[in-house]
Image (cartoon, rainbow, N blue to C red):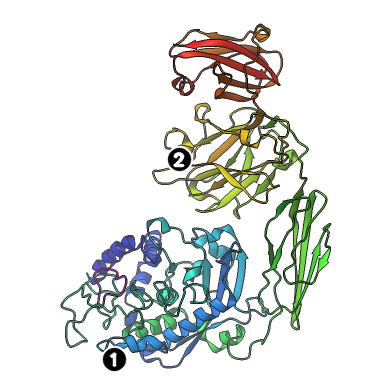
Amino acid sequence: MRNFIFTLLFISASIAGFSQKCLTDYNYEKYQKAHPELQAQFDKLTHLEDYAPQQKTTAAVRIIPVVFHVIHEYGAENISKAQIEDAIRILNEDYRKLNPDTIDTRAVFKPFASDCSIEFRLAKIDPNGNCTEGINRIYSSLTNDADDNVKALSWWNNTKYLNIWTVKSIAGSSGGTILGYSQFPGGGAASTDGVIIRNDCVGRIGTEPGNGFGEYGRTLTHEIGHSLSLFHTFQSGCNGGDQVGDTPPAATANYGCVLTTNSCSGFSSPYTYDVPDMLENYMDYTNGTCQSMFTTGQKSRIDNALSNYRSNLYSQANLAATGVDGNGPLGCAPKADFIVDKTFGCTGSNFTFSDFSYNGIVTNWNWTFTGASTLTSTDPNPTNVSWSTPGTYSVTLTVSNAAGSDTKTRTSYITILPLQAVDALPVVQGFESATLQADGWTLENGGNAATWQRITSSKRSGAASFYIKHYNATGTTSGDVDAFYSKTYNLTNTTKPVITFYTAYAQRATGVNDVFRMYISIDCGQSWQTKISKTGNSLAGGVAMNANNFVPQVADWVLQQYDLTAYAGVPNIRFRFETISREGNNLYIDDINIQDLKTGIPSNTNALDIALNITPNPFSQTASIGFSLAQSSFVSIQVVDMLGNRLELMENKQLEAGALSIPISENVLDKLAGSVYYLTVTIDGQAYARKFVKL
């Protein structure tokens, strides 16, 4: 009965914890549900103090090799070695009861504060036998809204190393502030065993001002506690808390540091009176400034977990194999890495490169810039590097020290575009070419198998469209950013440019909102401005919610447009189309057209040449446009007022030859007041017009 009650309370706490600081409970519950055949294993973890009782008196210090996998996009989340070393210092103080703030532990709890006899050390030998600083850096957009997916980017054998992944943000944070989560021993697959933690919860260097721990300062201590079998102090509420006898139970998670809190009255044993909640305990949600202790009972659980599940970590053989026994290498050869302030630029633009090498102190730098004005450099961070000829160029960095050297080459890394683009309007991109690159456009993959790709089974017109599969997150994850770019175009001879395209999207469920954005650059891609940003229902454009794999029908395509008049005369303009996955549904795009729509009213004397008519005319509710094309042509249809101002763009795409009938949509009709207008049809640059009356 005790097991049954605890399980129910555990699940309840897990669901509540999903919107809080730590996702460990939530993930453990999911694993329980997915693997009911392991119930005996779960019960063993719940009552781990009943196993290997001889381990409860362990006094010898256990050394645990650690590796930090820093998942980053070269921002602040690419935390420094000093910050990681500070995190190790804090862990060792907390788990050895050497932290200076033990003096703040209230007198009633001090007799129960325990030295857990654990020391953490950064690994010095990696799984391949190479010298390492215990830090592995991986560039990936998966650092955003991270989940277990980041673990596949870099994982070291969990029987030899404690894996810690640091990320920019953690999936599920929309409902709260998720700082990290861990995997209980035996509570998941070996390949996911370890801790995920937000980068600003690692150490105190570069994360928080002053000397205090602040709200997040003991997050890593807390999460590693889970990996060593400890539950939250509020895990099963007042019915046992964390199932450790000397830890007073808490009804719910405590925040801040309100020392008078006593949420479970009547709890006294092994104390001599009804004690308050133990806000000092690392396994509550209290601020780092308030936390200062593990209990003797928690140490017993840790001892048993180490003995039953993680004994190889601190075995002498493993300490030697990972180089943390004091005999490991003293210094490593560096691993080359670098970034640049921008990857696109015009001819003559200056680029600044920054060395991001790690794993050893660099003493020599040798840069090679293919085709640049400065071909080589020995500066750690070269500046004012430029290219005078349009093209795509590679950059190489070789770094070295007394222990060795390493070279990194980024091929096709820098793209140089002409100050004045060659290509002019009109632009027609219907994804008819076999590859995007065949049209001079480029693709940017966000780091997953799924990205923008050509598809022939779903399209608005022609033979194909472009789409990205977000449904079921197959090959993607929440936060994954994927984009594609146009060529640069010359608008110097335009007066009324406009870009139009069609999208098709359906929300998967309420609150699941994939994001679509269109950006514009007028400096060869050095900087971008957002011009269209849509998500959720605004992106769907009224298309009904679809819980299944979305495949658009003809009526599901929605016209998107942006007036480029402000950019008329610009010598180079470039477009970026971007999506951010929220594990929602598929997004399609087709018929991207950039056209110069002249102002004014064209003569209607040639309207008979294409049999242009509007039926009926006048009309109040419905009407159709009819005309004939002698051959396949690029056609723009718009409504113009009596002053020649364009009011509505109805079509802007390639149409096949023949007699055509196009209904005027209700969306257009609803925007027109009762008055006289012109309908203009532009066919391959030749304009025709008909006057009509809206009643």
Element type at marker 1? helix
Q: Percent from the top left, x then y, of residue 151?
A: 54, 65
Quadrant placement of the N terminus: bottom left
Nearer to us in this view, 357 or 550: 357
Where 520 sits versus 263, above or below? above
Q: Percent from the top left, x then y, of residue 138?
A: 61, 66
Where 430 sits versus 313, above or below? above
**Does residue 588 appear anywhere in the picture?**
yes
Earlier along the polypeptide chain: callout 1 or callout 2? 1
**Does residue 193 appear anywhere in the picture?**
no
Figure disc tally:
2
Element type at marker 2? loop
Alpha carbon separation for disc pair 1 and 2: 58 Å
Q: Amino acid at mark 1?
A: Pro
Q: Which residue is mark 1?
A: 111
Query: Does residue 42 belong to the magenta stretch?
Result: no
Nearer to us in this view, 139 or 209: 209
Where 397 sits versus 556, above or below? below
Q: Which residues are magenta?
A: 249-258
Q: Percent from the top left, x then y, of residue 516?
A: 53, 43
Residue 431, quarter of the rendered image = top right
Residue 459, quarter of the rendered image = top right
Where 178 sits versus 523, above or below? below
Residue depicted at 52% across the width and 69% down the height: 165
Q: Which residue is mark 2?
A: 548
Residue depicted at 58% across the width and 72% down the height: 156
